[in-house]
Amino acid sequence: MNLALWIAAGLLAAVALTGGITKTFVPKQKLAGTNGGGWTGDACVGFVKTLGVLELLAAVGLILPGVLDIAPVLVAVTAICWILLMVGAASTHLRYGEAKFVGLNLVYLALAAFVAWGRLGPEPFGG
């Protein structure tokens, strides 16, 4: 179970890192032209960049607290925050008629729920 939780957290961290780098450093106009990025055309630059920074923080929060054994409960807290972020992402993609991305958001949400459940329940760090 511990290995499965690490794999799930690692996958989510990779997704968060990729999305965070993209939203933080790629110009909004270029993002708006990408598949699934149409919503950025209607969002202000600050909002897109803020989401990017939050995703970068999520990438860190899903891995480092567990690896360093410093406040490892933050892994579960980060996973819960990711769940909330994916609810917002899914609803946004739904409004833009991007069903493929809604499904992907729900997969990420399920992985995050698994990590949160596992780290708060049956397989906490140091447990």
Image (tube, rainbow, N blue to C red):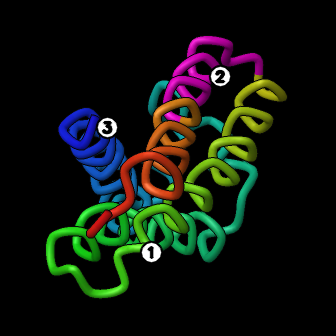
Q: Quadrant of the N terminus?
A: top left
Q: Residue at the far top: name it.
A: 100
Q: Which quadrant does the C terminus fall into?
A: bottom left
Q: What amino acid is at disc 3? A: Ala
Is 98 colored magenta in this rendering? yes
* Residue type, numbered disc 1: Leu
Question: Which of the 4 quarters of the picture holds residue 23?
Answer: bottom left
Task: Give the vertical position of 17 relative to 34 (above or below).
Answer: below
Residue 67 within the magenta-colored segment of the rendering = no
Q: Which residues are magenta?
A: 97-108
Q: Which residue is mark 3?
A: 8
Left or right of 118 on screen, residue 5: left
Residue located beneath label 1 in the image: 74
Question: Residue type at mark 2?
Answer: Val
Above or below: residue 16 compared with residue 64: above
Distance (Cα) linking label 3 and label 2 = 19 Å
Q: Is residue 62 left or right of residue 49?
A: left
Question: Magenta part mainly helix, strand or loop?
Answer: helix
Q: Secondary structure at mark 3?
A: helix
Residue 31 percent location from the top left of the image? 46, 46
Instruction: Label 2: state its secondary structure.
Output: helix
- Residue under label 2, please give it: 102
- SS for dot 1: helix
Outermost residue toward the bottom?
70
Q: Residue furthest right?
A: 95
| Left or right: 42 as drawn, with respect to 34 | right
Report x, y in % for residue 45: 60, 70
